[in-house]
Image: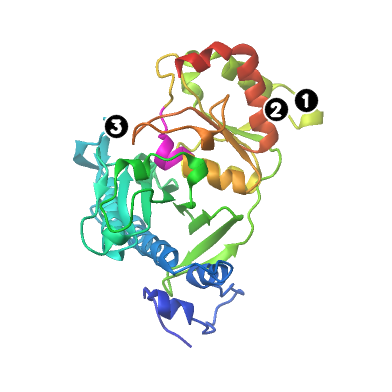
Amino acid sequence: MLQASGISLTAKEETNFNIDIERPFPMPMKTLVQFINEKQVEYPDATGDFTRLINDIGIAAKIVNREIRRAGLADINGYFGSTNIQGEEQKKLDVFANEQFINALKHGGQCAALASEENEDMIIFGNKYSMGGKYVVAFDPVDGSSNIEVNVPIGTIFAIYKRITQEGASGSIEDLLQPGRNLVAAGYVMYGSSTMLVYTTGNGVNGFTYDATVGLFFLSHPNMRVPETGTIYSINEANYVYFPEGVKRYIKYCQVDDKATNRPYSTRYIGSLVADVHRNLIRGGIFIYPGTLKNPNGKLRLLYELAPMAFIIEQAGGKASDGFRRIMDLEPYDLHQRSPVFIGSVKMVEKAEEFMREYSRDFVEKM
């Protein structure tokens, strides 16, 4: 029996990890790296770089998870004393997590450049290993960090693109400003009642739960599928007065009593994109963060929040749009570009789009 509380294994050790561990419940034993290696065999030209890149992201997530689990004891709560490019006050956890993911990607050698919510400009890795990296990464280190003091689930979101510029040269802004349809992979880590890493490479969605006793992510949610419809809508109704008419009408539709469509729907709004979308991925539902009269482009960022989450939801059988257009087809022109979003179960998103086309067609011109 292995007594291994808190250990973290290398990718090679993880691949060969087949030890039975005594525990009261059965546990799936396929690790994240084992799963990726199995899928890699399907691609003759695969070199293992992607496996190492995902492993680096996983290592950073484990370190962030450790600090979150100690948040009430360690000095990780509260504000850092500065603001990010969004004009938002940075939390200590935002800064800590950002540093962990940057360091992990920098030293891994597979990532040539990255973009982060916490940095105004892209970060180009100039060392000889990273300049040969095949990939660039855009990420939000801590989605929903304002919730950490109240023990609400938060997360990390990442998007992986294959670089456009030549390998061996420095990465460029062109490598990162790609539409979501060009994504190689996308995923999120949710730090909640359990810590999960969910990702897709364009061939379905799989979820892995972290076991801190052995320091590994294990396959726990294979082939995740979002239900075609649901009974949950997620939106910050405090902004109702500023919503376009199409969104107001859809909310009223959700609240009407109609047994044939299981209405009225329930409102569930956590205020963390990862947590709200993850719940709807499991149970079905729609998450909406629309443009408003004050902010037509909404609040959430296209490159490192909406595009990766849209990729995941689409691969799970759902839909994501800005109310009129597919999120994955939007062309980014800025690292921190914003967009409205309607994401979740296909039938619910399509119904919301109907209301937008009927009552707010002119709103698209403001976006």
Q: Is residue 303 magenta?
A: yes
Looking at the image, do the residues carrying marks 2 and 1 touch, with CB atoms under 8 Å apart? yes
Instruction: Confirm whether residue 309 shows in the render.
Output: no
Q: Main secondary structure of the magenta part?
A: helix
The image shows residue 86, relative to residue 71, as above or below, that is: above
- Foreground mark, 3 or 2, reads 3
Which mark is on residue 86? 3
The image shows residue 282, relative to residue 61, as above or below, that is: above
Looking at the image, which residue is at 71% across and 21% down?
Answer: 256
In this rendered view, identify the residue nearer to me: 126 or 77: 126
Which amino acid is tagged 3? Gln
Disc 1 secondary structure class: loop
Mark 2 and mark 1: Cα distance apart in space? 7 Å
Can you identify the residue that label 1 sits on?
A: 258
In this rendered view, identify the residue nearer to me: 182 or 243: 182
Query: Seen in the image, is 250 located left or right of residue 34?
Result: right
Q: Quadrant of residue 74?
A: bottom left
Can you identify the residue that label 2 sits on?
A: 264
In this rendered view, identify the residue nearer to me: 46 or 201: 46
